[in-house]
Image: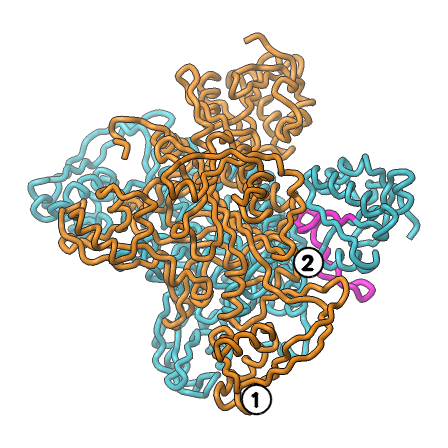
Chain colours: A orange, B cyan
Amino acid sequence: MVDEAKTRDKFTIINELARRRGFFWKSYEIYGGVSGFVTYGFLGAKLKQNIEKKVRELFVNKLGILEIESPIIAPSKVFEASGHVDHFKEPMVECLKCKRRFRADHLLQEFAKISEVEAEKLSLKEVEEAIEKHEIRCPECGGIFDEPKYFLTMFKTTIGPYSEAIGYGRPEAAQGIFVEFRRLYEMAREKLPFGVIQIGHVLRNEISPRQGLIRSREFTIIDLEFFFDPEEPNCFLLIDFENETLRLLLAENKLRGSEEIIEVTVNEALEKGYIKVEWQAVFMALAKKLLVGLGVPAEKQRFIEKLPWEKAHYALQSFDQEIYVERWGWVEVSGHAYRTDYDLKRHMEFSGVDMRVFKEHEKPVEREQAVVKPLMAKLGPVFKEEAAKIVGLLSEADPEEVDVSIEKNGYYMLGKYKVLPEYVEITRQKVKERGRRFIPYVVEPSFGSDRMVYVALEYAYRVKDDRAILSLPRDIAPIQVGVYPLVSKDGLPGKALQVYKTLLNEGFMVEYDEAGSIGRRYARADEIGIPLGVTVDYKTLEDNTVTVRDRDSWKQVRSRIEELPQLLHKYFRWKANFEDLGKPLEG
Amino acid sequence: MVDEAKTRDKFTIINELARRRGFFWKSYEIYGGVSGFVTYGFLGAKLKQNIEKKVRELFVNKLGILEIESPIIAPSKVFEASGHVDHFKEPMVECLKCKRRFRADHLLQEFAKISEVEAEKLSLKEVEEAIEKHEIRCPECGGIFDEPKYFLTMFKTTIGPYSEAIGYGRPEAAQGIFVEFRRLYEMAREKLPFGVIQIGHVLRNEISPRQGLIRSREFTIIDLEFFFDPEEPNCFLLIDFENETLRLLLAENKLRGSEEIIEVTVNEALEKGYIKVEWQAVFMALAKKLLVGLGVPAEKQRFIEKLPWEKAHYALQSFDQEIYVERWGWVEVSGHAYRTDYDLKRHMEFSGVDMRVFKEHEKPVEREQAVVKPLMAKLGPVFKEEAAKIVGLLSEADPEEVDVSIEKNGYYMLGKYKVLPEYVEITRQKVKERGRRFIPYVVEPSFGSDRMVYVALEYAYRVKDDRAILSLPRDIAPIQVGVYPLVSKDGLPGKALQVYKTLLNEGFMVEYDEAGSIGRRYARADEIGIPLGVTVDYKTLEDNTVTVRDRDSWKQVRSRIEELPQLLHKYFRWKANFEDLGKPLEG
């Protein structure tokens, strides 16, 4: 832990600047503030929107990923099926004296120097033993802790007027995609592969959140679920990314206690089996490029493979994209989970709705196959009103699987229903198979908007001649152009307002400012990251030219007002450099 | 109630089209669906975003309203202060037999033919009497109802691991603005007037939601809070809108049972006192223009003034902007509430934080004034650890008010604290007043995104030669351009994909489609509202020209590929008509 009182590290600086200039701050300050909730002011909201816009351009516009919007509140069934009700919890201890509650694994990290990796691995019993062994007491009052319990970190509520209709605030946007898979597949015209993305608020009821934008109870997630045929896992985009390099910290190295990073191309990572599927490797390459585009150099990024006990319950392989930040070290900004068919399968089991897709063979295949005929006379009395549902489910089950399971185990588990040999008649017949039914596999890149906002700010921050500059990439800067009359008299404000309105009507995010000296206005503009300043001076009144100033180099060029809109459109689409905007002026 | 089985009205048609084409549908269908929750597919999400973008262009870009983003979950204190915990509730009855629950006022409307206006007015006691008098029984099982109770229609949860830390899902985005007023005022450089807007999900735990997008439990609100000095209520934008006409249904006419609509200009409405503040009238004119821009003709819009008992608890005057839709009649799409200083005052009382702003006089004013000196020797023993807070609050209170109240009532209510004469010493002194402190007044236009999506769809829908067309205004259409090879052979798809990529790189929302006959592809494009179709044919291979087709008129023009991006940019910015896109082709 860094002693905040002594050092003024970047985290402190960014948060202080963010509060002062209205990027973001802790919500509900007038009521003492509530940990884990952040409010974005104008500049922060716009920066966040611009980052999300960049994500949309990359995935939705360029790659044709389909964006959807689903609710934040979901009925408990959804999260029972997804496994969150069972798994989305953290060990918590309560002080017997002051009744304060703490995250047990965080206490072990802080007071027993047990690594995060080790702490996350422990069972409740082991947590209790470790607390006893290291004689950890309440950090607030020194009291003894009660035995640890699991705390479900979803926000719970009820939907409608019946208290038994439990609902949860979604901890991820992914389930809003999985539960609607049937409709989304139709939307994608019943072709694999396809991807669906959702950007929206999620809720995680952290026991004791800290770290500002890094760990909140409410934040914006960008979940992208990419569905593909596991028998055709090849990525047609691979060719565009195969030589992109990735910095990997593999699980096998972590297990040996090593922090060694290997730098490999996407192709090498796939060939050596570091990354299991092509789509995942390509999304990791895209994620790297995205963060480079937000101003984070490649060497400050890494992908760390999750260990078996660190992985979410749904993931076969999982990498976190981490960015190095001064205060907290490596911080996750995106997760890349290979979710396989876990989620769709679970929803199929819990809902009884077929989540499989049908893919036709190029030509029909003839083969011998088991045929399962349900015997209603047996099923009816046993399952009563559910018998029809079981018949339906049986017709969708793989008959070979049913046959093999009944042969081997003496029963077949149809979701939660146990099918006994006497319920069905199994024969073998020659069938012409027109195609096959299967549950698509999924790779998921998942980004945290708020963390991207934070890292973009930390990497944009620099000091020049004792002045703070936010060198945000020009396409995410909240305000694009500042328009200033040199002085607020002699008709300069009127002229400047004309320029301001012209740029406004061209769709630029423009700010007009005539308060204080031009130097102070430039300084303020630099601190909130406005890439270009347009200054109207006495010469403007004569020849309709203006000074354009670069935030980062403080260089200036002289441009004709009539050419400005076109030049600026080019500049903000990265089709022109600052030097292309006009004739250079002597510093 | 319309019998859905018999008629296929526009509501049915739009919902069916929305489901089939993936605009939106009821969420969680695989689990039987949950009333009041809607998921937007790709086309719907994009349409909604485009509508919200139009709102942003109007308010944020053009008028300089500051956008913010605050959390959905708030601590209970916020909604105690705002009055929602007391007022945001509906009368509910439970059937004693089947235990089903219903909104009592809706039952009275349906089964006792009591008008909405009358039903909303009734107290719980009166509701009970009306149910008895009209012998209303459970519509599901015929059972008798228990006595009516109020049901709080906010989603309740707990924040963090302590069950006493009650939180609510916000039913409006406005409070996220009010509680942060101090920071927002700084952001606005401490000048009035200024406005703050927030677009985001809100939660209202309706007892029995129906009506699809019209009444949901989770939806997107656009709350704009505009702060001004009540002593300077003039709107500098009035000059641009004074002759805009508004169709008003006034409360005084409603009270007489009349539905008479008067059409007046903004200026007349203000002069005759129909609308109390200029800013509100201007925002109403803007709201009208916005909806016209979404495709709703002015004559299908009206502003209906709320009656005293219909108004929200915070509103001095309130108009609903209503749109006529086929199934439901007049439906609210925006509310225009004159919230005065209600919210800031309440938060000041509940938090003890000064929400007033200071405005300097042009020159200081000298006058005699009461000076209130708190007597700690008296306050201390009575209020203990709260005494300091009271001294602080007292220093912020208007001393004249304190003086007058103590004189008149024998005490002064300082928020929830009662200040008795013996706690303070009041003298009269000559003071130079540099300026004045006051709580800004607020007018609030508040839009429902989802309802705007619905009305845009209903008004866009038409049938031509038995084919459905969604004539969405070109700037909100989810997909802007469809690109089609005439046939999928002879190199046409390759050429079409080139055109597709060119337009994609220019930032257009483009779809490439080569499936089925060109006629079928046009029909599909018309049904999802793609304004322009670009078709690549054999002639394209010779001379690099393409056919451009208009969704609404089905007219076609021939354009050069190289000119297309520039032409389309103009077209989508309303700077060119369809006819300007090329040479007309014979039908």
Q: CA gap, disc 2 to disc 1?
A: 36 Å
**Residue A191 circle label:** 2
B477 is within the stretch colored magenta: yes
For the residues beneath circles 2 and 1, the answer to whether they share a chain is: yes
Question: Can see residue B451?
Answer: no
Front residue of B360 and B540: B540
Report the residue at 59% width, 27% height from top.
Answer: A500
> Residue B213: x percent and y percent?
56, 63
Residue B532, above or below A366:
above
Residue on which disc 1 sits: A376
- Give coordinates of residue A572: x percent, y percent: 61, 29
A491 vs B321: above or below = above
Callout 2: chain: A
Q: Nearer the viewer, residue B117 or B511?
A: B511
Q: Which quarter of the figure is the N terminus of chain A placed in?
A: top left
User: Which secondary structure lies at badge 2?
Assistant: loop
* Outermost residue toward the front in this view: A408
Residue B504 place in picture, x, y as percent: 70, 41
Q: Position of residue B370 (x, y in %)?
A: 20, 37
Q: Is residue B519 left or right of residue A548?
A: right
x 63%, y 17%: residue:
A579
Mark 2 or mark 1: name the one nearer the start of the chain. Answer: 2
Relative to B105, does residue B508 appear above or below in the rendering? above
B272 drawn magenta:
no
**Label 2 sits on what residue type?**
Lys
Q: Which residues are magenta?
A: B460-483
Q: Does residue B416 appear in this view?
A: yes
Categorize mark 1 by other alpha carbons within 10 Å: few (<14), some (14-19), many (20+): some
A486, A520: nearer the viewer: A520
Q: Is residue B572 left or right of residue B259?
A: right
